[in-house]
Image (cartoon, helix red, strand yellow):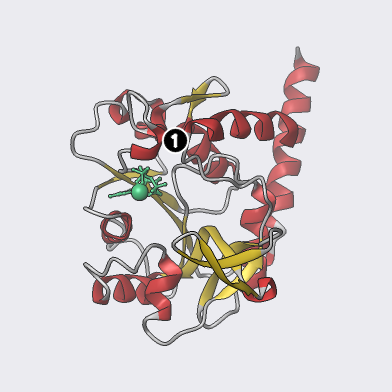
């Protein structure tokens, strides 16, 4: 028994040392996570919002939050939740001391802004915020740390992204008008990492603009050029029913 406790303790210590050895952990700047989780999941066509569907013995949202908390880098995780959401209070994680519940917004960008505002009294303008979709439960610690390591000294920030393997076409009606140069096209994933002050201001100024479908687009509207960091292809967004089985498959093979 004593041996078992010692082993767990040693494992705990070595995990902490591994994470704390990262330089950014010793800097004064803090890291915050923001999770928009207030969507209805229309395309999923399920009996509840997709973030509450079961995945590997938990809900999608719990899996996502566990991935963020396990990265051991965030001062807190602010989660935007719909006012009519009966599922959230039932989750143990809603009472976690590092989880903050924020109000929802009409669109994803409004939910993100609401979650940012909930951090107002704790976050400094120069702190980093990583915004991550509730519907991406397969995010790995390695991708979180890769994003942070790559961008922590950047002036603007940036996002995880994936290149496109397929040939891409411009289409009008059902007619192909041209083949697009694939080398300049990247698919935007999350997390998206920006400074608290800059992101909040960019989202406030872009409020109501339907073209703001991610954080980077709000920064682009300010004339800035966020960076891309190549992420892992298993960081999928659960959007349609078939995605849930794929997420389950990735989770089983990630360990
Ligand atoms: N989201 C949010 N607030 C909104 C709309 C979306 O917090 N008003 C969140 C979703 O919960 C999701 C993320 O933004 O985690 C990405 O959005 P999306 O995948 O489009 O989710 P839904 O809007 O729920 O799905 P759908 O578009 O199919 O209705
Ligand atoms: Mg949506």
The residue positioned 48% from the left and 31% from the top of the image is 241
Q: Nearer the viewer, residue 20 or 105?
A: 105
Q: Is residue 155 visible?
A: yes
Check the image and name the residue furthest to the front. Answer: 175
Q: Nearer the viewer, residue 62 or 170?
A: 170
Q: Where's the N terminus, which quadrant? A: top right
Instruction: Give the tally of numbered discs.
Output: 1
Q: Nearer the viewer, residue 231 or 67?
A: 231
The quarter holding residue 212 reads bottom left
The x, y position of residue 106, in whole percent, is 21, 53
The quarter holding residue 46 reads top left
The x, y position of residue 15, in whole percent, is 72, 43
How many neighbours does mark 1 have within 10 angstroms: few (below 14), some (14-19), or many (20 or more)? many
The residue positioned 42% from the left and 43% from the top of the image is 98
Report the residue marked by disc 1.
61
Is 96 left or right of 104, judged from the image as shown?
right
Is 112 rendered above or below residue 134?
A: below
The x, y position of residue 207, in whole percent, is 23, 69
Q: Where's the C terminus, which quadrant? A: top right
Q: Nearer the viewer, residue 228 or 171?
A: 171
């Amino acid at each position: 028994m004593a041996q078992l406790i010692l082993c767990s303790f040693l494992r705990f210590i070595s995990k902490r040392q591994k994470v704390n050895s990262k330089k950014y952990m010793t800097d004064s700047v803090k890291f915050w996570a923001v999770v928009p989780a207030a969507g209805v999941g229309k395309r999923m066509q399920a009996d509840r919002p997709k973030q509450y569907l079961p995945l590997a013995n938990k809900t999608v949202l719990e899996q996502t939050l566990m991935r963020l908390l396990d990265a051991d880098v965030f001062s807190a995780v602010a989660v935007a939740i719909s006012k009519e959401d009966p599922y959230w209070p039932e989750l143990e994680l809603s009472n976690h001391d590092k989880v903050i519940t924020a109000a929802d917004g009409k669109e994803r960008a409004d939910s993100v802004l609401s979650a940012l505002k909930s951090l107002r009294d704790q976050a400094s303008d120069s702190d980093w915020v990583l915004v991550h979709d509730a519907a991406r439960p397969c995010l790995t610690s390695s991708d979180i740390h890769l994003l942070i390591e790559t961008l922590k000294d950047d002036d603007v920030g940036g996002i995880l992204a994936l290149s496109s393997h397929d040939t891409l076409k411009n289409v009008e009606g059902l007619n192909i008008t041209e083949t697009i140069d694939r080398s300049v096209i990247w698919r935007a994933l999350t997390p998206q990492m920006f400074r608290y002050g800059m992101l909040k201001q960019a989202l406030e100024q872009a409020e109501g603009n339907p073209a703001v479908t991610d954080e980077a687009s709000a920064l682009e509207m300010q004339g800035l050029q966020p960076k891309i960091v190549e992420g892992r292809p298993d960081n999928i967004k659960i959007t349609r029913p078939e995605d849930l089985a794929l997420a389950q498959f990735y989770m089983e093979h990630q360990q």
